[in-house]
Amino acid sequence: MTLAGPRDELALVDLLDRLLAGGVVLTGDITISLANVDLVHISLRALISSVSTLVEP
Amino acid sequence: MSDEVMYLYAVTDADLGDAEIDDMRAVDGAAVHIIAEAPVAAVVSAVDAERFSASALRRNLENLQWLEDVARAHNAVVSDLAHRRPVAPVRLATVFANTENVRALLRTRAQDFVAALDRVRGRREWAVKGFVGLTDPPSAAAGSTDTLSPGRSYLERRRAERDSHTRHIEEASTEADAIHNRLVKLTLANRRYPPQDRRLSGYRDEMVLNAAYLLPAGAEIEFRRVVDEYHEGHLRLELSGPWAPYSFATLEGDQ
Amino acid sequence: MSNGFGRIDTNPDSIGKDLGRLVLTIVELLRQLMERQALRRVEVGDLPEETVENLGLGLLRLEEAMVDLREYFGLQPEDLNIDLGPLGSLLPRSDSDAR
C-alpha cells in the first residue's frame, strides 16, 4: 500500500476526477458542461502542439 | 466591480471567521472572501469576468495548463478548509455574477447545504485505487512453440501473452469488487469512479478500481489496516487521502 | 512541470528525441493494432499456412525494429505509454482537430 505524498504533489488526474465529476453541482450564472471536457484529447493536443512549436522556424 | 465575478469554492458553516481565510490564496493568487448567510457561508474569490465568461471557460477548459492551475488553486482552498471544518466542496468553475447572487443561493438552498455539511461532519474521504499486479510470464506457451516455424511461433507467443493479460485483468477486477465490498462495510458512503486513463495518469499498470470512501474518524485505523494488509494474487492497492469530501458533496433535491 | 502527462521538455537539444517519441508512439499504436487484427484473422482459421507464417514473420520483424528504434532514441517502453482505446482520439482526423 502506498500513501499519497504531501498536498502539493497531488496527482492532477486525481484532482480532476474530483473537481470535474465531484463537488456540488450548482446552477451558477455561467453554466458550462464539464462532462464534455475530454482530458485525453486535451493532453494529447498539448503534447503534439508543444512539439510543433519546437519545429517552427 | 463589473469586470469581476465570483468564483465559488465551497460552502461551510457560518461560523467561518476571517482569520481562518486571511492567508489563503485562490485562483489567480487572489484573496479569499466569506459570504455569510446564516446558517451557512460561501467561500469565494473575485476572478476576471472576461476569463470566466461562458465562451472563455469553454476555451480555457480545453487548455490543460489552465485547467491544472485552476484545479490546484481550487483544491488548495477547499483542502485547507477541510482540515479544520466540514465543507461542501463545489465543482470546478462555478461562477456567479456578483455577491448578491451568491447570497440568494445560500438563502434558497440553506437547508440542503446544512444537510450536506452534516453528512460530512467529522468524516473524511479516502481513496483506494486498485491495479493489476504482478503478471506471470507465459511459461506454458514457450515449450510448445519449439516445433513451430518462426512466424507461427511468434503469433502463438503473442496470443498467449494477450490471453494471459486478459485473464489477469479479469481476475484483478473480481478481486477489486471483493475488496471494495469489504471496504464498503467499514464506511458510511462510497463512490466508484471510472478507472483513470493510462495516457493521463502515467501509471503503467492497468487500473481496475478507483473508489472514494467516506469514513468516520474512528474507522480510519481499521480501514487503513485492511488496505495495508491486503495481499491477493492479482491486485495491488494504493491508498490516498484524506481528501476533502468532493465525492460525497451532493445536495438533496438534486437527482 | 512534470505530471506524468507526457509533457515534452522544450530543450532544443532534446528535439530529436521528442519527435522520435511522438513518431514512435504513433508507430507503436499501429503496430499493436496490426498485431491484434492479425491474431484475430489467424484465429478465424481461414488463412493458408504460408500467409500465417508471413504475417507472423512480418510482425516479428516489426517488433524487433521497434525495439531497435526505441533504443536508438533512448526510450523505454513506458515512454510510449499507450492503450488501444478509441483509435480516433489519438490520430488526428483531417476534417477536425485542425486548430
Image: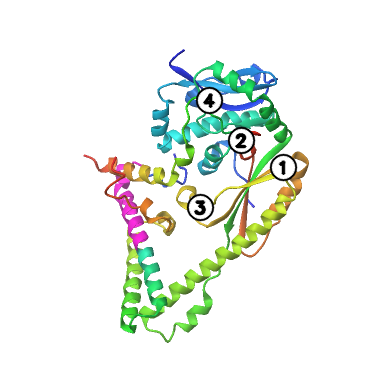
Of discs 3 and 2, which sits in the foreground? 2
Q: Classify mark 2: helix, strand or loop.
A: loop
Residue assigned mark 1: B215
Lower sequence index among marks 3 and 1: 3
Asked if the residue at tag 1 contacts the one at tag 2, i.e. Cβ–Cβ closer than 8 Å, the answer is no
Q: In this view, does B115 lie to the left or right of B146?
A: right
Mark 4 and mark 3, same subunit?
A: yes
Where is mark 2, residue-wise? B254
Q: Quadrant of residue B116?
A: top right
Amino acid at dot 1: Leu
Give amino acid for label 2.
Asp
* Residues at discs 3 and 1 both on one chain: yes
The residue at 63%/36% (across/down) is B249
Check the image and name the residue furthest to the right. B218
Q: Which of marks 2 and 4 is in front?
A: 2
Q: Earlier in the sequence, mark 2 or mark 4?
A: 4
Residues at marks 1 and 4 touching, judged by CB atoms closer than 8 Å: no
- Identify the image quadrant of the N terminus of chain C: top left
Q: Note whether residue B228 is visible.
A: no
Count the marks: 4
